Amino acid sequence: MTTTQPATAPARASGLAALRRLPVWRRLLTLLALPLILVVIWWVTSDRADSFFYPPLRDILATFGPTWFEGRLTADVVPSLGRLLAGYALAMVIGVGLGTAIGLSSRLRAFLEPVLEFFRAIPPPVMVPILMLFLGIGTGMKIFVIAAGAVWPILLNTVEGVRGVDEVLRDTARTYRLGRLTQLRTLVLRGATPQIVTGARQALSIAIILMVISEMFAAHNGLGFTIVQFQRSFAMPEMWTGIILLGLVGVVLSVLFRIIERPVLFWYHGQRQSHRGGN
Amino acid sequence: MLEVRGLRKVYRSASGDTEAIRDLTFDATAGEIVCIVGPSGAGKTTLLRCISGLLAPTSGTVTLEGHDVSGPPGGMAVVFQEYARSLFPWLTVAQNVELPLKEKGLKKSDRARLVQDSLEAVGLGDVPDSYPWQLSGGMQQRVAIARAAAYEPHILLMDEPFAAVDAQTRADLEDLVRDLWQRLGITLLFVTHDIDESIYLGQRVLVLSARPTVILEDVAVDLPDERDQLTTRNDPEFGRLRTHIYDLVQRAKQGYRPDEEAAESAV
């Protein structure tokens, strides 16, 4: 979990940096080449396939607008995204809050570790049937499922991040007698941010998965619910549009994540770059 | 000003105890520069951490301005060797200098003046909005020194602050420290492994033995207060002191101790 952090962050940063050096049209080409190739392959293979379950992409795209833009966007997509955001926000608050407390106190860490490991090992989807019994099938249950699954990478990465705050920096804060609140804000939380962001990124994909799963079990609206309804009523092109829409939602959310991440972690990427430059 | 009495530090661990410091007793009077040299592994950093209140001694006391040190005391600033790790990378140069002043509760206008003055004093008046990692190593250590100076401490502790910068930067920074010390009238405790540096900067040089540490000798540096890199280092007295302290450090490396008893137990 924590080993992904040093490996992915700089690699991604340098990949983007390499991309940024290219002219605009080359950049777009690099980004869009593979999606275009995949769409073309899908188009060609589905056009000839004579399968009810694998309709031509042409038909799928034709049904996309009528399926989603005539009411379902507000009736299904917005509620889904609302639950996703609520669950994700809850996971962030609990994960960062509890993770900071655990990271700062070795006693608390020893006390909680076995229980945390136990709950972490349970795949959140299996909790859905049980939670339905206690919390019903309403919005509360779905938000809880999303938060319960997404909280783990945030929590564990926050613990590691808080524990990993530089010793010399800690000593500096102590010798200048920075207060507890100042230390928490300007030392601990800022210092742990690279790991917290890594956890938050992993949590985002988990949250999307759980958003869909929680709606597949029991719901009266939502993206997952709608896709299952289409499947059960053999509305194949519509079902495929739902899957495409889910993918697009994922892309948009990850772009948003990156836009928020850049100003938060500018110092981290800058520091890494200057180290590589041997400054 | 600063009194260290019978300081002893033993690191306890499952694999056995390590006695880092056996018995250190010395004073520093207000406004004095005391340099501490010793062979590597002589517990210099341990000593400084005990004095700064970051580390609790096993026995003995540290008293600063009449108060026993049990945690980092007020009126004290520390400059660490690892400059890159002692500056907050998410704060600008000016914000790094300002942070302790904010915590002290100084007014905004006073803070701005202190930040500006101290950055100018270290020759960094033109980069307040840069981030530490955009600066060279020597400049980063200047920021740490500016932060310490702006804090207006009564005593400044420096732990091998120039060990990781190149030789020319080092000479500049040594002059900068002498200059600040004269201007601010503070007490300065300067730990180094560099014998020349200790003589150039110090009014007194405490030579430490190898571990477990005791004081081998408290050497008075009888050089004029106005020092510069060329004349001071060519002064015959400088040469005599260097020979003397070099000899002491060499003997310390071979396990020489002033008390016969300790020498026997060490063998």
Image: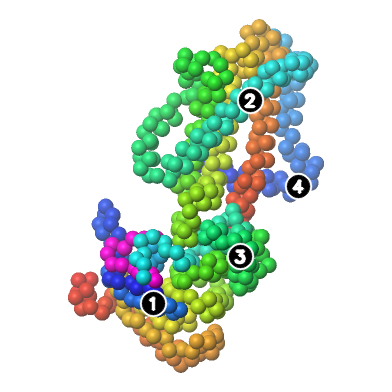
Q: Marks 1 and 4: CB-CB under 8 Å? A: no
Q: Amino acid at mark 1?
A: Ala
Q: Is residue A191 visible?
A: no
Given this view, does label 1 or label 2 mark the residue nearer the observer? 1
Q: Earlier in the sequence, mark 2 or mark 4?
A: 4
Q: Chain of mark 4?
A: A
What label sits on residue A82 in the rendered view?
A: 2
Q: Which is more toward the observer, B102 or A214?
A: B102
Q: Quadrant of residue A257?
A: top right
Q: Marks 2 and 4: CB-CB under 8 Å? A: no
Q: Earlier in the sequence, mark 3 or mark 1?
A: 1
Q: Are marks 2 and 4 on the same chain?
A: yes
Relative to A165, residue B261 above or below: below
Cα distance in 3D space between marks 3 and 2: 48 Å
Q: How is the image coloured?
A: rainbow
Q: Which is more toward the observer, A75 or A159?
A: A75
Across and down, in percent, residue A115 comes to 38, 31
- Residue of label 4: A22
Read off the magenta span. Answer: B54-65
Label 1 SS? strand
Q: Amino acid at mark 2?
A: Gly
- Residue of label 1: B28
Cα distance in 3D space between marks 3 and 1: 30 Å
Q: Are marks 4 and 3 on the same chain?
A: no
Which residue is at 65% across, 60% downward?
Answer: B130
**For the view shown, which residue lies furthest in the bottom direction?**
B236
Q: Chain of mark 3?
A: B
Relative to A42, residue A21 above or below: below
